[in-house]
Amino acid sequence: MTGAKIAAMDSLTRKKRVLILMTKAGGGHLASARALKSAFDTRYGERLDVDIVDLWMDHTPWPLNQLPKTYRFTVGNAPWIHELYYEVGKNRRVARSLMRAACGFARETLTHAIEQYDPDLMLSVHPLLQRIPLQVTRQMRRSIPLVTVITDLVSIHPTWFEPEAMLCFVPTDEARALALKAGIDPSRIRQYGLPIRPVFAEPSPPKTEVRRRLGLAVDLDTVLIVGGGDGVGPVRDTAQAIAHRFSTATEGGCPSGCQMVIVCGRNEKLRISLQGVSWPIPTEVLGFVDEIWDWMAASDCVVTKAGPGTIAESLTRGLPMVISGYIPGQEEGNVSYVQDHQVGVFETDPNRIADTVARWFGDDRAELILMSRRCHTLARPRATIEIVDETTRHLGETPPAPWEEPRVLWRSVLP
Ligand code: UDP
């Protein structure tokens, strides 16, 4: 057989390749990338090869590859710097010039990465990885379609909107409106929700069962406290205020039976210091947990920063939210999203957060139950499956059997 024939045979038998482009800034982009890969693998594993690549950190030269690391520092220590970058980047001309410069600087390594993975389709879950991969593939004289999956809920930075992307998946009505305003062709816009891990599409087991399995008290109201993948925000002050509120007050409608689950994510310093505290109420302090869906399923409400991933996941678990803070810029709109849809409240003062939780577990339990129902209505647990099916259809593959609609468990917060 000639070389040409072998190459032709190879191209017939070769699985199609999808390359998910992300970078590790915060937990959300990585979590979305993993969620999409997991759905691709489960549904199309025999027909597609799917890789996740951190194009910034692993395939650009120093100092560009350090950029994602500055994210955690600025978000945690100097949010105003983060906000400044965010606002400056909104200027289309400035953003394009910076992308062009980055592309020129990293052209060689980026080209090498694309050659190495040789994808049939690129799917980007990061706003800074829209223009750049298209520019690099154009310079390589390759035409590889790019699909954008937006992983912010409401405040969508303009760099997300790439008119040349074959499809643009938006999570909410608000994001769709912004996409249209940014000039994205309506025929390329799809709205299924935020990509979260497919396991969130499965109904949760009864709360008591999950609590027993996780070693929690079965009959205590449970508040989950999280600060995104990196454990940022006023996690410690909030936990202390809640512990104090429930350990001291039993009058005024404040019940005494409450336990806390504190998830510190990758913030090891926080985890170690909180594990050293002698908590006056039952408290579980955890580092980064993979099975956060179980901890959510075991809880009755969540105190969190306005991270899009945590909000979307909490909705599927029917968890009313106290939003305790937000990253300036990209998370601002999420606060009003939660408030407008009446699935939670915005409160930054730790003592008032504790009061809210105490009310929800006391006199205002009916409100908590109502909010939990609204969470289920607003949730889009199938988003990841639908995004993956739609993308794969564009690669000429037909989806497997229809996805079974998950059951909704209203009993989750019923007393
Ligand atoms: N997360 C997790 N385990 C943890 C902490 C967080 O799996 O211990 C996940 C969380 O479920 C969510 C993501 O990390 O999917 C955090 O994303 P979000 O958009 O809420 O905030 P970010 O960390 O991106 O600022």
Image (cartoon, rainbow, N blue to C red):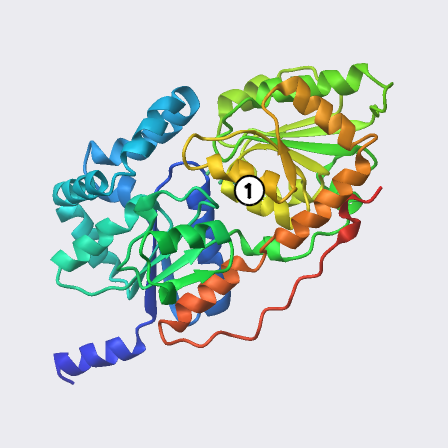
Res 365 quadrant in image? top right
Picture quarter with the N terminus: bottom left
As drawn, is 109 to the left or to the right of 256? Answer: left
Q: Position of residue 64 (x, y in %)?
A: 22, 35
Instruction: Report if residue 280 is visible in the image.
Output: no
Query: 159 left or right of 321?
Result: left
Which amino acid type is shown beneath numbered disc 1?
A: Tyr
Vertical placement of 315 versus 198: above or below? above
The residue closer to the viewer here, 110 or 212, is 110
Which residue shows up at 37% across the image and 67% down it? 187
Q: Nearer the viewer, residue 135 or 16?
A: 135
In this view of the protein, can residue 209 be seen by the observer? yes
Q: Position of residue 31 (x, y in %)?
A: 47, 46
306 above or below 241? below
Badge 1 residue CB within 8 Å of ligand 1: no
**Which residue is found at the position 43% from the left and 23% from the top?**
76
Q: Is residue 1 left or right of residue 17?
A: left
Image coords of residue 286 (percent x, y): 60, 30
Image side of residue 204 versus residue 275, left or right: right
Instruction: Please give the name of the residue rendered at 47% of the width and 49% of the height, measured from the top-left corner.
Output: 174
Q: Residue under label 1, please give it.
A: 337
Of residue 168 and residue 23, the one placed in the foreground of this image is 168
Position of residue 301 measured from the top left corner of the image (x, y, whole percent): 69, 36
What residue is drawn where x is 69% and y is 15%?
Answer: 278
Q: Badge 1: how crowded within 10 Å, few (<14), some, or many (20+)? A: some
